[in-house]
Amino acid sequence: MKQTTMRLKKKILPLLIAATLTIGVTAVAATGKISMWTGSSASRADYTSLPTLEQVTKDIGYRTVLIDTFENGYCFKKGNIIKNSFKDDNANVIEKFKSVSFDYQKNGDVVSFEQQKFNSKLIPSGDIIATVNGTNLYYVHYINKVVSDDYELTEQDKKDQASGKLVFSYDDSASQIDVSQVQSVNWNKDDIQYDLLQIDGKLSAGELADMAKEVINNRR
């Protein structure tokens, strides 16, 4: 499900951020194939300081891991509540759920820490780069291409998408094609999906994995 690890936020309304991601054929829910993962949040941060566990649980309905500063110096900057939907090929909603995305920053470099809980069972993708207390950490790296809703895929686009080299995000306000390098370390623990994500970031896969180990060790 490497395409689902992405959370691009593109402003399409003054007070709304949203993204639509295409998902590969390996992303299958118990109710059928999931073709799209859509997410939206307020353009203004919901959290400007690290919230309490009680506050986040009230906002999204489940307990999360809260870290103010990682051992490598990345500090909490802001956070948002995300409203998510899984959809099938006909844009029918399969499942709705809320998640959180926290941004951590160091010298201008940002790591997004995302936590999400849903009922659909997605098949993990990526290379296992470490195992921590029985939990596999998966590393995913790909090129994300943000295009307008009316963009028509070229034959090369289709080949790259099928191979997993390219992932497409659709934004109806996009005036030009935006390409970025995306990397993520993701894992599932107690039915919660965790992602440490960088877009054009500075960290290595090993450094992201070290942050993931810290999250796992902080989880109670």
Image (spheres, rainbow, N blue to C red):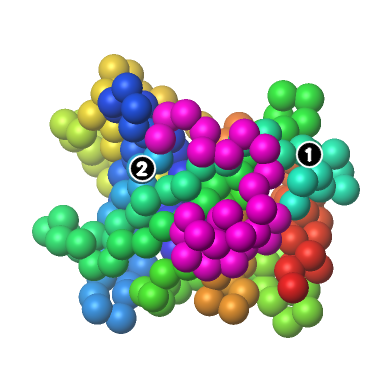
Q: What secondary structure characterizes most of the magenta part?
A: loop
**Amino acid type of disc 2?**
Ser
Q: Mark 2 points at which residue?
A: 40
Judged from the image, the secondary structure of the residue bearing numbered disc 1 is: loop
Residue 70 rendering spot, x and y as whole percentages: 81, 47
* Circle on res. 74: 1
**Amino acid type of disc 1?**
Tyr
Image quarter where the N terminus lies is bottom left
Label 2: few (<14), some (14–19) or many (≥20) C-alpha neighbours in 10 Å: many
9 sits to left or right of 111 = left
Residue furthest to the top: 175
19 sits to left or right of 191 = left
Q: Earlier in the sequence, mark 2 or mark 1?
A: 2
Q: Nearer the viewer, residue 94 or 139?
A: 94
Name the residue located 67 percent from the left edge and 73 percent from the top edge: 136
Q: Nearer the viewer, residue 188 or 182?
A: 188
Image quarter where the C terminus lies is bottom right
Name the residue located 41 percent from the left edge and 57 percent from the top edge: 98
Q: In which quarter of the image is residue 57?
A: bottom right
Name the residue located 29 percent from the left edge and 27 percent from the top edge: 12
Q: What stretch is highlighted in magenta?
A: 42-66
